[in-house]
């Protein structure tokens, strides 16, 4: 398959336009302006609110003016991750796509199909002359990936629709009707610099090439967390040799399972060969533990120039113990459906030399508010016991299933008619903006679906091309029949 053979052409043409425009989270201004001008160029009502969300209203096609208004909604920001050997500026450069069989991928970066493909579908519907629908509101929200602040900042009179279709899900054939709520828990260690003693040997430790993925939707897929792997080895080495920490830079975005982690440590020179042997044994053990999910991971131990100063021993010991002890992964499964109920992700660890701090970010998710609070308290307690300052944000709410959803019944009926099989109706452990919409617009009837994506929030992100056409046909059928 080539770029010119992509179907539906109208959607992929719009996706190509979307990927020309830089849109990192919290810096989506160019994308907001593009969409605002796009709506106006079609002669449609278009406006932007104070936080950068855009709404474009399209009147009903002839004979369907009496239908209730449907909101189509996608977020315009994207997770900006790239491979370490790729030169790319997410503030300036266009995403470069390529076709691998039935999959669309990007060249060494995230693809931006989360949620650029949803944006493209809305753009295609706005421009279409042959699609039958009632009154439409196409809504494009900002900053979904780093805090849902676009949806949170939206005024409760921005949208006026009765139904909302969120185009931000990642498995074709699944219709989502609920989502988890989530929050961030951050910890900060303050350290003192101590002069480097004589007789030490310095090495860097790096773990790279992990699968990573979405910290909600992929948390149950038995993928390794690079930060936790690094912490495991640091704890082992500290217990045996009393290591000294010089630097640690691990992980990235709060909603991504970390793929890379590194640390620089100092050790008595007489132990350097034993440390190297322990590292090799550790690598073999980890490869065995994750033989199915982490076949591409890499381990590196290299000599480093000795730094003039190190993190004070007390803070180093407390940090390493806390990183070993803090929980990561799935805590519990739902008692009602086959779905992760509560989880936590150790997202990033960064030493900031200018402020003499080591800053740690983690995220907690749960479909139950009480369980989410408990998980945040559990993570926070470990870091407080180790002497860190800890903050937990307010977070965002979950979205409860509406058992009387008319939109869901139409979506299921049309899917069966089109494809001759039942869709899967389920909840998702990731956060969706539907949770915030359910608070601001409590009578809004909502579902979420989208084409199949894999490896989201990582440079391995890919879009299953045939599912785009399936979702497009399904969406048009719902608009015609709701």
Image (cartoon, rainbow, N blue to C red):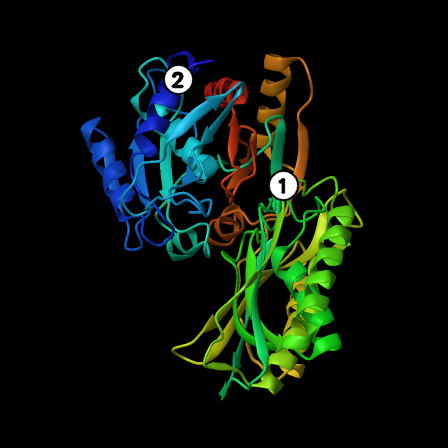
Crowd band around label 2 with a 10 angstrom C-alpha radius: few (<14), some (14–19), many (20+) = some
Residue 46 x, y percent position in the rendering:
25, 38
- 185 shown above or below 142: below
Q: Is there any visible trace of residue 374 in the rendered image?
A: no
Q: How far apart are marks 2 and 1 (CA)?
A: 29 Å
Residue at (56% x, 38% y) in the render = 455
Using the rendered view, name the quadrant where residue 361 is placed: bottom right
Using the rendered view, name the quadrant where residue 332 is placed: bottom right
Element type at mark 2: helix
Residue 234 x, y percent position in the rendering:
66, 69
Closer to the camera in the image, 53 or 202: 202
Q: In this view, does 62 lie to the left or right of 384?
A: left
Give the residue pinned by disc 2: 3
Closer to the camera in the image, 58 or 206: 206
Q: Which of marks 2 and 1 is nearer the N terminus?
A: 2
- 66 shown above or below 142: above
Q: In this view, does 125 lie to the left or right of 341?
A: left
Residue at (66% x, 66% y) in the render = 231
Closer to the camera in the image, 97 or 12: 97
Give the foreground label among 2 and 1.
Answer: 1
Residue 126 x, y percent position in the rendering:
32, 26
Crowd band around label 1 with a 10 angstrom C-alpha radius: few (<14), some (14–19), many (20+) = few
Give the residue pinned by disc 1: 296
Element type at mark 1: loop
Residue 303 x, y percent position in the rendering:
55, 64
Q: Is residue 226 left or right of residue 337?
A: left
Q: How many marks?
A: 2
Q: Is there any visible trace of residue 23 in the rendered image?
A: yes
Residue at (44% x, 33% y) in the render = 106
């Amino acid at each position: 398959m080539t770029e010119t053979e992509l179907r539906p052409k109208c959607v992929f043409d719009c996706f190509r336009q979307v990927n020309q425009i830089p849109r990192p989270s919290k810096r989506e201004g160019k994308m907001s302006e593009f969409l605002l001008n796009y709506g106006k160029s079609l002669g449609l009502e278009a406006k932007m609110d104070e936080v950068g969300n855009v709404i474009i209203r399209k009147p009903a096609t002839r004979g369907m003016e009496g239908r209730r208004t449907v909101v189509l909604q996608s977020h315009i920001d994207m997770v900006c991750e790239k491979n370490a050997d790729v030169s790319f500026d997410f503030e300036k450069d266009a995403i470069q796509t390529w076709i691998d069989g039935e999959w669309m991928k990007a060249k060494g970066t995230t693809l931006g199909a989360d949620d650029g493909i949803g944006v493209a579908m809305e753009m295609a519907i706005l421009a279409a002359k042959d699609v039958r629908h009632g009154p439409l509101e196409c809504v494009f929200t900002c900053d979904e990936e780093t805090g849902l602040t676009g949806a949170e900042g939206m005024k409760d009179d921005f949208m006026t629709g009765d139904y909302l279709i969120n185009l931000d899900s990642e498995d074709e054939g699944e219709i989502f009707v609920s989502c988890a709520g989530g929050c961030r828990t951050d910890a900060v260690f303050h350290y003192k610099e101590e002069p480097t003693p004589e007789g030490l040997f310095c090495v860097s430790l790096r773990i790279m090439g992990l699968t990573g993925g979405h910290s909600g939707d992929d948390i149950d897929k038995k993928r390794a967390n690079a930060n936790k792997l690094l912490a495991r080895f640091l704890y082992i080495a500290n217990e045996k040799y009393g290591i000294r920490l010089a630097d640690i830079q691990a992980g990235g975005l709060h909603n991504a399972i970390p793929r890379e982690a590194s640390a620089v440590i100092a050790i008595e020179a007489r132990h350097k060969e034993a440390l190297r042997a322990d590292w090799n044994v550790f690598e073999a053990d980890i490869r065995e533990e994750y033989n199915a999910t982490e076949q591409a991971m890499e381990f590196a131990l290299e000599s480093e120039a000795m730094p003039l100063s190190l993190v004070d021993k007390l803070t180093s010991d407390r940090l390493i113990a806390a990183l070993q002890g803090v929980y990561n992964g799935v805590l519990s499964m739902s008692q009602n459906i086959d779905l992760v109920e509560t989880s936590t992700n150790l997202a990033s660890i960064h030493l900031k030399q200018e402020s003499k701090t080591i800053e740690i970010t983690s995220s907690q998710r749960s479909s139950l508010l009480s369980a989410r609070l408990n998980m945040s308290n559990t993570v926070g307690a470990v870091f407080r016991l180790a002497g860190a300052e800890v903050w937990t944000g307010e977070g965002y709410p979950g979205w409860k299933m509406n058992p009387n959803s008319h939109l869901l019944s139409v979506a299921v009926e049309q899917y069966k008619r089109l494809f001759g099989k039942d869709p899967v109706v389920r909840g998702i452990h990731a956060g969706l903006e539907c949770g915030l919409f359910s608070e601001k617009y409590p009578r809004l009837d909502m579902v979420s679906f989208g084409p199949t994506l894999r490896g989201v929030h990582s440079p391995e992100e890919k879009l299953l091309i045939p599912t785009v056409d399936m979702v497009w046909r399904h969406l048009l059928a719902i608009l015609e029949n709701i």
